[in-house]
Image: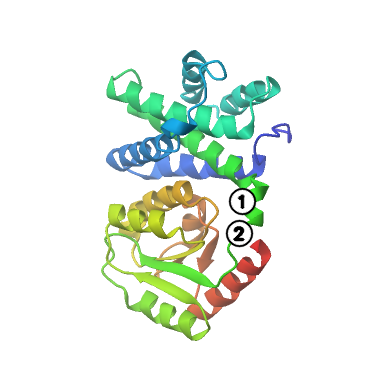
């Protein structure tokens, strides 16, 4: 498709859509359901009572029509729906609060009432996630306010038993002048609560085994929703396929060793600042 969607970064939308489709094809049914539930829950929270748009601006019927569009396999149907609303004068912030957040809430209600299937919900949440990623990326005000401090959260993927490598990397970063918040052996909900409180602008994750790949995918999706402007990198163990990680997980960097990670993160922080 051409670059005909001013509301989104089309390249980022297509990449996020493709990676989410790969997740659905790779994960088992329970993991896919958990991922869809996470997205519904986290995106629903974006609409606070004080920020809900007036009924005259975005009606429940319009949100319902958007939900009907989201369950279709074609992700561009959702873009066309948003384009049409933008042409009517809806702002990007209205799209985020009035459509993405509200549609997540409505999809959750329909799922609870068995009005949509698990497959339909996972398709819809994938489209919502891609829209969220591309809309957030277009917010220039957020980019100008990017935190240029050399600080980062380093954490093991939930369920990981080995924290030696990331501990050594944290020590190397500290010696180079970085402030490192090291979190080892923390489960998903506790780690995400910590992320929400601390709002890190750089995150490094350690994955030592393919058995935790599903947990990594779930964690990164949650982090993208909670801290959308963060740089996220992953250091993987030997034997893991780097191409598979790049295709499945929505990350910015795949680290080789601590020294190259230090150089790459320094470069990216300078660019974003």
Q: Is residue 180 visible?
A: yes
Give how far across and how far down residue 110 sits, in percent. Answer: 34, 21
Q: Secondary structure at mark 1?
A: helix
Q: Secondary structure at mark 2?
A: loop
Q: Residue at x 62, y 34 (%)?
A: 92
Q: Nearer the viewer, residue 118 or 45?
A: 45
Q: Are marks 2 and 1 in contact (CB under 8 Å)?
A: yes
- Which mark, residue 142? 1
16 versus 263 height, above or below = above
41 versus 211 height, above or below = above
User: How would you rate the neighbour count of disc 2 (Cα within 10 Å): few for under 14, some for 14-19, many for 20 or more?
Assistant: some
Give how far across and how far down residue 47 sits, in percent. Answer: 45, 34
Residue farthest top in this picture: 61
Q: Is residue 207 visible?
A: no
Q: Nearer the viewer, residue 45 or 230?
A: 45
Question: Image check: 64 left or right of 34?
Answer: right
Residue 33 image-quadrant placement: top left
| Label 2 to label 1: alpha-carbon separation | 6 Å
Give how far across and how far down residue 48 sits, in percent. Answer: 43, 35
User: How would you rate the neighbour count of disc 1 (Cα within 10 Å): few for under 14, some for 14-19, many for 20 or more?
Assistant: few
Quarter of the image with the C terminus is bottom right
- Which mark, residue 206? none
30 versus 213 height, above or below = above
Q: Residue at x 42, y 31 (%)?
A: 49
Residue farthest front in this picture: 50
- Which mark, residue 146? 2
Q: How many numbered marks have been drawn onto this rendered protein structure? A: 2
Q: Residue at x 67, y 65 (%)?
A: 271
Question: Image check: 125 left or right of 183?
Answer: right
Residue 81 image-quadrant placement: top right
């Amino acid at each position: 498709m051409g670059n005909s969607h001013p509301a989104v970064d089309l390249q980022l939308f297509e990449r996020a859509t493709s990676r989410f489709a790969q997740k659905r094809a790779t994960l088992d049914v329970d993991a896919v359901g958990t991922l869809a539930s996470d997205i519904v829950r986290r995106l629903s929270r974006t609409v606070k009572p004080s920020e809900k748009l007036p009924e005259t601006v975005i009606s429940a019927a319009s949100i319902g029509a958007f939900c009907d569009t989201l369950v279709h396999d074609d992700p561009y149907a959702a873009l066309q729906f948003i384009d049409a609303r933008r042409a009517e004068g809806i702002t990007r912030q209205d799209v985020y609060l009035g459509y993405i957040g509200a549609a997540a809430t409505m999809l959750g209600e329909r799922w609870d009432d068995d009005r949509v299937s698990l497959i339909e919900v996972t398709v819809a949440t994938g489209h919502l996630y891609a829209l969220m990623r591309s809309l957030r990326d277009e917010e220039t005000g957020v980019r100008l306010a990017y935190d240029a401090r050399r600080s980062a959260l380093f954490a093991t993927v939930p369920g990981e038993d080995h924290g030696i490598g990331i501990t050594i990397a944290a020590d190397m970063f500290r010696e180079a002048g970085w402030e490192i918040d090291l979190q080892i052996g923390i489960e998903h909900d506790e780690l995400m609560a910590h992320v929400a409180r601390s709002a890190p602008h750089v995150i490094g994750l350690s994955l030592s085994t393919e058995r935790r790949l599903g947990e990594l995918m779930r964690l990164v999706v949650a982090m993208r929703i909670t801290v959308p402007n963060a740089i996220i990198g992953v250091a993987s163990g030997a034997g893991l396929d780097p191409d598979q990680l790049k295709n499945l997980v929505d990350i910015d960097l795949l680290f080789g060793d601590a020294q190259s990670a230090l150089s790459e993160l320094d470069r990216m922080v300078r660019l974003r600042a």
